[in-house]
Amino acid sequence: MKNLILFSSQTINKVISIYILLITISLLTSCDEDPVKEDTPELITKVTLTFTPTGGGDVVVVTANDPDGEGVQNITVDGPINLVINKSYTLSIELINGLALPTDPEYNITEEIEEEKDEHMFFFAWTNNVFADPAGNGNIDNRSDAVNYNDEDTNGLPLGLSTDWTTATSAASGTFRVMLKHQPDLKSATSSSSAGETDLDITFDISVN
């Protein structure tokens, strides 16, 4: 009779152990199923920069193309960007994923960036003082350097789909670089171009005449 009681106690202990193990596995599985914040680059095959002069004048449009996205083909640009001396422009940026159908939500990356603006920010850099305003060389190397953003996210932080530029008062030429960063849970008033994943990084030749 004592052996029977001992056996029953062991059996109960085993059942309790198995029950605890099952609960633990269930909890771990549910943790694994928690949504993970996406931090992957957007697929962009075409970028269009449109410089619209204030007060009238010729609109300047340049594009960059990478037809196979992350494939073997290199991105190509059709610059240079040719702007007029001492002229103010508004720059708008359009982003397309040409590997998707125009009816697919993945096609218009501009809209996606707008919808996820709390996670994205454009950074800019230029050389040889081609702009009088903003002065300097852009905020890719230093976040606090001036860029004239026209748009912002819900936290009041800059986005960069629209920006303002005034060219130099004398002829100049150099390069103009545009970088788009994806910064979920990283974007802040001080987050730099080194934070997050790079969705886009292109450089155009630029001239002011």
Image (cartoon, grey):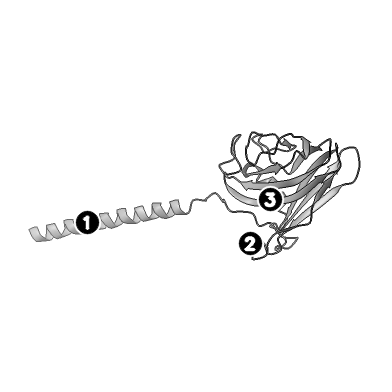
Going from N to C along the chain, the mark reached first, 1 or 2, is: 1
Q: CA distance from mark 1 to mark 3?
A: 56 Å
Does residue 158 appear left or right of residue 209 in this picture? left
One can see residue 37 in this view: yes
Is residue 161 left or right of 42 when viewed as pictured?
right
Identity, as a three-letter code, of the amino acid under mark 2: Glu
Q: Is residue 43 left or right of residue 132?
A: left
Identified at 40% across, 53% down, the residue is 28
Above/below status of 70 relative to 85? below
| Residue 172 vertical position relative to residue 80 in the rendered view, above or below | above
Give the camera-side residue of 13 and 197: 197
Residue 189's mark? Answer: none
Residue on which disc 1 sits: 12
Mark 3 vs mark 2, foreground winner is 2
Q: Residues within 10 Å of mark 1 (few under 14, many from 20)?
A: few
Residue farthest along the left direction in this orientation: 2
Residue of label 3: 112
Q: Earlier in the sequence, mark 1 or mark 3?
A: 1
**x, y percent for residue 44:** 68, 56
Number of numbered markers:
3
Q: Nearer the viewer, mark 1 or mark 3?
A: 3
Answer yes or no: do the residues labelled 3 and 2 have beta carbons within 8 Å? Answer: no
Q: Position of residue 38 (x, y in %)?
A: 56, 51
Name the disc covering residue 70, or none: 2
Please tell me whether mark 2 sits on a helix, a strand or a loop.
Answer: loop
Asked if disc 1 and disc 3 are in contact, CB closer than 8 Å, the reply is: no
Given the image, on which type of amino acid does mark 1 rest? Ile
Q: Position of residue 95 (x, y in %)?
A: 73, 53
Q: CA distance from mark 1 to mark 2?
A: 58 Å
Instruction: Judge by depth and name the residue closer to the eye, 105 or 151.
Output: 151
